[in-house]
Amino acid sequence: MKRSHFYLKTYPEAPKDEISVNAKLLSRGGFVDKLSAGIYTILPLGWLVLKKIENIIREEMIAVGGSELLMPSLHPKENWEKTGRWKSLEDLYKLKEGDKDFALGPTHEEIISPLAKRYVSSYRDLPIYLFQFQNKFRKELRAKSGLLRGREFIMKDFYSFHRDEKGLDDYYEKMKKAYARVFERLGIGEKTYLTYASGGSFSKYSHEFQTLTEAGEDVIYICDKCSSAVNKEIIEDLRKSCPECGQRILRAEKAVEVGNIFKLMTKYSDPFNLHFADENGKQKPVLMGCYGIGLQRALGTIVEVHHDGSGIIWPENVAPFQVALIGIQGPSAETGSKSVSLWCEKIYKQLKDKGIEVLYDDRDVSVGEKFVDADLVGIPIRIVISPKTLEKKSVEVKERNKNEIRLVQVSVLNEKILKILGRNG
């Protein structure tokens, strides 16, 4: 993509009302635009990142048997009354149309359970694994920390339906591993811990996936023996010991929750009479599990983990582009400038032909501005072409997370870039 054709504007300063690192850098870099507290427009550059996050999650959910669907955001009051949450859920947005009451969905248990009831009648119909990517709406009074806590956001919510506890337990363990793969691919795996949390009224524990960052609102206690953790909310109940291995937990860290998994058991199947007939024809309740990841929160967390004083440092898997291409014009339009422009076009095309995503900064602005923008936006690889490099039939290559600048021969540039990206030619 050529920068002159792409909807992108960067800013030297962050909005005055933004405090968190992710909000400052994403706003300055032209990834998001704040409409109101906890409500952000995802701009084209941010959308590229968000779609890559979504696709990584989708691939891992399909790998564990998930089938994707899309449920409505507008929910009838009756569904929420069945579970008692019409009155008990404080962050529920409610609206009225004539004499009908509706909610804007903050979650979808009240919708997925009666939907599954239409399909399930026998043990032969189970298990079922369904997931979606859907806008959620929550009346979040503490909307802050940029994209880490919002009022409207996209969530991947996944629901599993089982005939017995063994089936639920086995799948729950499978989902733990799937989530670990997701966060590894998003570039935050090393800082993300499987964290024991309260299971509420339907399970001894639930599990969160907590990523270490000073921007986090949670405190977790990490066990260095088994690399799991415990949320501060239940640490005293466990006598400061790890439920995974029994080790005393000593290290407290701030973290942000990037995902969670719950064993719902029959909490939402009972209100909707979601039952099945076993081999003997006896009616039994369906057991449920749910598994969530907020996409904007994941995006914001990646920025909190991967940045420096100059801007964002995107992991390659989620970067909006893989290469930033910049030309430095020579002092004479008859010599250096024309040659640089021709080579920029040529290299831009050959990289694209290899399937490499390139943002070519073809704007008529200073080189310094182009360099500042490239660092701010955080594209993993920067290629610079100038009269001096062309004299050596080379270009400058710099990785965003490294200080070293290398001269690379144009004849082997494709091969070198693919190698940096971990791909074969």
Image: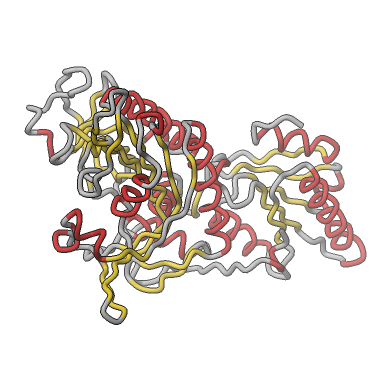
Query: Residue 138: horizontal and vertical position, in percent?
Result: 28, 62
Query: Residue 131: horizontal and vertical position, in percent?
Result: 43, 45
User: Measured along the vertical axis of the image, is residue 205 above or below residue 279?
Assistant: below
Residue placed farthest to the bottom in the image? 98
Identify the residue at image location x=12%, y=33%. Answer: 235
Query: Residue 164: horizontal and vertical position, in percent?
Result: 27, 27
Which residue occupies the foreground of this view, 106 or 9? 106
Q: Which quarter shows the C terminus?
A: top right
Q: Is residue 404 left or right of residue 330?
A: left
Residue placed farthest to the front in the image? 281
Which residue occupies the foreground of this view, 202 or 411? 202
Q: Quadrant of residue 160?
A: top left
Identify the residue at image location x=36%, y=33%. Answer: 122
Report the coloring of the rendering: secondary structure
User: Measured along the vertical axis of the image, is residue 167 above or below residue 100?
Assistant: above
Q: Is residue 204 left or right of residue 156?
A: left
Identify the residue at image location x=41%, y=48%. Answer: 156
Q: Quadrant of residue 252?
A: top left
